[in-house]
Image (cartoon, grey):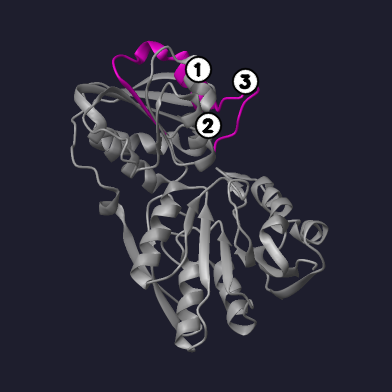
Amino acid sequence: MQRLSHSGLPNSHQALLKNQHLLSGRLALLGVASEHLLTKLPSSGLAMTEHAGVFQALERDGTWQASFGYDDPAVAQGSYDSIVVFLPKARAELEMRLALARSLATNKAQLILIGEKKEGIAGAVKQLKAVAPQAFKADSARHCQVWCAESIEPAAGFRVQDWLTWRAVECASVSVDIAGLPGIFSQDSLDDGTRLLLETLEEQPVEADSLLDFACGSGVIGAWIQAWQAAREAPVASVDGVDVQSQAVICARETYQRNQAVGTLYASDGLAGLDGLWSGIISNPPFHTGVRTDTSMTEQFLQDVKRHLKPGGELRLVANSFLPYEPLIKRYIGNVERLQENSRFTVYRAFRNK
């Protein structure tokens, strides 16, 4: 998610509004970060977002065709005359987003790329010109650049599965295959925080028959827990997962299928949209919004988590040690202890009071 200005819109969305004259015909917006943009545009069309909360807001608007991520069946290829691509934070994801844009294009469609300077629009232009050498800078506005490519070459047949990658992740002598997509957290390797969390789960398992992995990402925690339990011929707990990002949910489903893991995977902005109680909740929660440190999602999660933990249930969470989570866990859950820590990360454990 991009930083919102005083108008309630990200700078990139404001830059588009300033350049509405570039738009014509059927319109597709890829990477929408605020539903409020739609009410300020004179036309309607496709509005794609990877964020589950924004998608729900887009659906409520009702005047645009809302799409959740790259595999939404609502995306109709070869149907749009103007395609706006908002710059994603991951450079690798821009390549995938541009491929999707070309698949949506009619003959002689135009492609517009908008992004903030501090988020790397200058470097992104090289990727744009690789598929549209005729692209030119149309404007600089709201700390953003607006690039336009007329008469782009359509490229039919976009499939998100073609962008999937696989890697083997091993911890405590247990290996699982993990799916990846451009833009997902720690796509290329197991991050150090999650590894520390898994090590504590091997040394001091969560005693639970049902688990929830909050901010599950590619599904590595759930798949590893079940593989570790099966390797020890222990009862295998169901591990549900929830994430706000479309690519994460796609990857988690692929990971679960490849490893025969058991659990339901949800797309949700936090816990507010979920029902149910779990015996244990595990998380390596995000703390970035774009390039900024942002702990608001985790703080909201900690406020909500007690309603979803059974009495006596355990919360197990890993976080960068500088983040102020310990007093929040104590306030919202109960007494908290540090199970393990190193120079960068701390694993916390707390039990819901019965």
Q: Which residue is mark 3?
A: 7
Residue range (magenta): 1-30
- Would residue 62 appear left or right of 130 to someone viewing this image? right
Residue for point 24% across, 43% down: 158
Q: Secondary structure at mark 2?
A: helix
Q: Residue 48, can we see it?
A: yes
Which one is closest to the eye, mark 1 or mark 2? 2
- Residue 354, relative to residue 244: is it above or below? below
The tag on residue 57 is 2
Q: Quadrant of the N terminus?
A: top right
Front residue of 278 and 89:
278
Gap between marks 1 and 3 measured at Cα = 13 Å
Q: From the viewer's perspective, is residue 228 above or below residue 183?
A: below
Q: Is 43 placed above or below 239 here?
A: above
Looking at numbered disc 1 in the image, what kind of residue is underneath it?
Thr
Frontmost residue, 127 versus 202: 202
Mark 3 against mark 2, which lies toward the viewer? 2
Q: Which mark is residue 39?
A: 1
| x 56%, y 62%: residue | 213
In primary-sequence order, the first of circles 1 and 3 is 3
